[in-house]
Image (cartoon, helix red, strand yellow):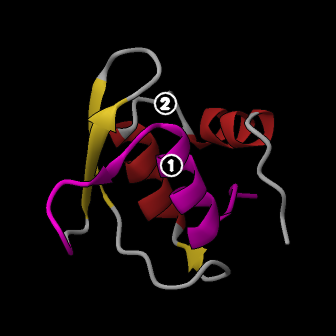
């Protein structure tokens, strides 16, 4: 069974990695993470509880330099994401 994410979880993750829109109103996020690596990621945020497609989650994990979505899920759980 694939690991699922919501848009709220991805937004929380981007915040933890110090990523912000590169331009005002942009859906391209970028920033230097806690490990000193600059990352960029395309993310269209709509609502917290809206699910993210599994392929999109996989692409986001790759652009944020996680090995896979399972590692991204473990990082979220470690950093204190609480499902509402």
User: In the rendered structure, does residue 24 fall within the stretch colored magenta?
Assistant: yes
Q: Magenta span covers which residues?
A: 1-25
Name the residue beneath numbered marker 2: 66
**Residue 67 location, x and y as percent?**
50, 27
Residue that appears at 41% across and 50% down: 60
Residue 5 vs residue 58, the one in the foreground: 5
Residue 84 pos. (x, y %): 85, 72
Q: Is residue 22 left or right of residue 73?
A: left
Judged by depth in the image, the label closer to the viewer, 1 or 2, is 1
| Residue 29 point in image, percent of width and height | 28, 53
- Outermost top residue: 35
Label 2 SS: loop
Residue visible at 46% across and 84% down in the picture? 46
Queried whether the magenta region covers residue 48, the answer comes back as no
Q: Measured along the vertical axis of the image, is residue 19 above or below residue 32?
A: below
Looking at the image, residue 35 sits to the left or right of residue 27; the answer is right
Residue under label 1: 15
User: Quick one: quadrant of the N terminus?
Assistant: bottom right
Q: Determine whether the residue tagged by mark 1 lies in a helix, strand or loop.
A: helix
Query: Where 55 sits versus 66, above or below?
Result: below
> Is 36 positioned to the left or the right of 12 in the image?
left
Q: Who's the residue at 47% across and 49% down the image?
A: 14
């Amino acid at each position: 069974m694939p690991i699922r994410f919501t848009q709220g979880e991805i937004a929380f993750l981007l915040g933890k990695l110090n990523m912000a829109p590169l331009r005002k109103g942009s859906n391209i996020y970028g920033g230097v993470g806690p490990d000193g690596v600059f990352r960029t990621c395309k993310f269209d945020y709509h609502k917290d509880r809206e699910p993210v497609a599994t392929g999109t989650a996989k692409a986001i994990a790759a652009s944020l330099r996680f090995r896979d979505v399972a590692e991204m899920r473990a990082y979220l759980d470690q950093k204190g994401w609480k499902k509402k």
